[in-house]
Image (cartoon, rainbow, N blue to C red):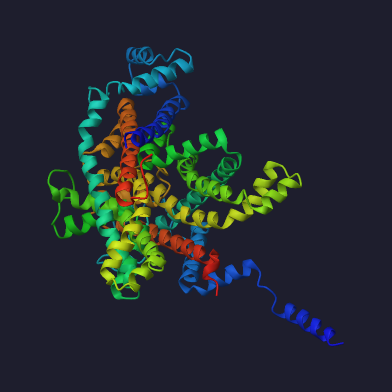
Amino acid sequence: MTRYLAGRLMQAIPVILGVATMLFLLLRVSGDPAIIMAGGQSASPQTIAAVREKFGLDRPLWDQYAIFITQLVRFDFGESYTWHEAALGVVIARLPTTVILTGSSFVLAFVIGVPLGLVASLKRGSIGARVAMLFAFLGQSVPSFWLGILLILLFSVQLRWLPSFGSGDIRHLIMPVVTISGFAIARNARLVRSGMLEIMNEDYIRTARGKGANERVIVTRHALKNMLIPIITVSGLQIGFLVGGAVLAETIFAYPGVGSLLIQAVGARDYPVIQATVFITATAVVLANILVDILYTFVDPRIRFG
Amino acid sequence: MAEIPLTTTTAATATVRGPIPLKVRIVQAFLRDNVAVGALAILVALILIGALAPFVAPHDPLEQTLVARLLPPVWDQGGDPNYLFGTDHLGRDILSRVIHGTRVSLTLSFIATTVSLLIGVSLGLISGYAGGWTDALIMRFADTMLALPFYVVGITIVAVLGPSFTNLVIVLTLFGWTFYGRVARGEVLSAKQREYVLAARVVGASRWRIMFRHLLPNIASPLIVIWTLGIATTILSESGLSFLGLGVQPPTPSWGTMIADGQQKISSVPWLAIFPGLALMITVMTVNTVGDALRDALDPKSWR
């Protein structure tokens, strides 16, 4: 277990290094990095000189890269120009709200997507199955940010049931979570459906039927367990997608998370915050992927650590 | 004596029935699916609307008519038959803007998806065929891009480089190529050991020739399907960036920007956001349906 974890974490290093390198290069293809990092042309010459000094921007490119990586490893992203405190702290303070948002969306995609797919595959041709497939089809084609706006129109403007912005209690979570998870629900439903249709023709299902197991046991004990494996694989890749969706949802619902922070920072050209946000979310997504991989072993005993 | 008529009969039946060519079978399978044919018809119509936007649109999408600001759609109280879908806060015709938005959306996503396909397939072929360090490097790059949240990194790149058509294509390609790359690589790895590749190598074909002349045609069908579905995803990604103000820049009419404008006034004039969103959804649905049908048609198991 420890060895497997260590190996998996080692694999994450090149990915995180890749993100860092991209951030590094991005700053340097877009003009003088000292000016960009100091907050644009309006920055005072003193600030620009200080930034140039701190990041060694007068040194050769390789030295700059080494300095950049060392500072990332120390989580030193510099001071935010808007909040006047360490950029890392600004991002960390907003992280829990986004984690709750994407975490709930991840769970909802599972809790609604899987049953939808089951209905669509097990009761083929029924009205329930048709409705489930229609939902899956709509979910895959509807732009999430537009869905969010329609939800506001219905539940905040017309019915006045839910608040249209801010965070706090669970009522603030409902619409953003639905907005983020809509696509993932649809994808899970489609995956479960096609997977179940395939699995129900397998030999071991026929064997189970032959020995007289009832249909419920066959579905839950035999089919569903095998079905979960591809779903978990896709869900792992979906985490990054959900975090991206959170950026849109947080903007629509003025939800104070990392996503809306990024948009604010981009608007203000607050480079330390932008860098910290991208680096921390990317690292979090990579770590979440590893977590999903570990989940595998609980579902599929054939996969062993090592 | 009896053998001669026998051979002529077989020859005759062969010319009459013959094996149906592969392409014909695929087209037949596609045409048998009514929903697919319908979706394809809508898609062709959308492409025509986009291509002929200046002739189809009843108004200039940028023309501001200040006396006709925020008109409701024609079926609502106070609607004007000159402006079927109503007007926005500057008195611009929404229908015309939605029509012109089709052009922007389809062009951008077609170019970005095609560039992704070309780059992804090339890198995937090289990765799968070369193996070793080249493979490791390309695949780690793909892993990196797959792990990253598109909007987080995409926003940053566009914000730093500046929003423009080219930079949008660059960002969408940077994320888009991985899907084609991974599929192409996987297919190459399984095809590499096949006899036809070994045969090509034996007769002295070069690596590049084997990759692009022998391997590529054999992995084309999954790539075509992903390309089609990729266009739908790219339309959504592009409109999301435009919605955040980092995509196509005003005054060029784009669905994402129109929805963002509409959100500001959602409680008083909801149609501003509803119409461009509907256009967006219908387009994505159509492309998805065509892609799904194409996948079925290319699958020999579905041929009857």
Horizontal relation, residue A174 to residue A265: left or right: left
Depth check, front residue: B57 or B146: B146
Does residue B89 appear in the picture of this structure? no
| Residue B204: x %, y % from top left | 75, 44
Residue B154: % across, % down: 40, 39
Question: Residue B119: x and y, percent?
Answer: 56, 43
Q: Name above or below for residue A82 compared with residue B213.
A: above
The answer to which image quadrant residue A119 occupies is bottom left
Q: Nearer the viewer, residue B24 or B165?
A: B24
Find residue A284 and report its horizontal and vertical position in percent: 31, 36
From where the camera sits, is residue B123 visible? yes
The single residue placed furthest to the bottom in the displayed view is B2
Q: Quadrant of residue B98?
A: bottom left
In the image, taking residue B129 as reference, residue A23 lies left or right, namely left
Q: Nearer the viewer, residue B240 or B125?
A: B125
For the C terminus of chain A, the quadrant is top left
Of all residues shown, which one is farthest toward the right?
B1
Q: In which quadrant will I find the N terminus of chain A?
A: top left
Q: Residue at x 36, y 67 (%)?
A: A205
On screen, residue A242 versus residue B112, left or right, reads left
Q: Residue at x 40, y 44 (%)?
A: B250
Instruction: Count up the numbered dots.
Output: 0
Q: Residue furthest front?
A: A211
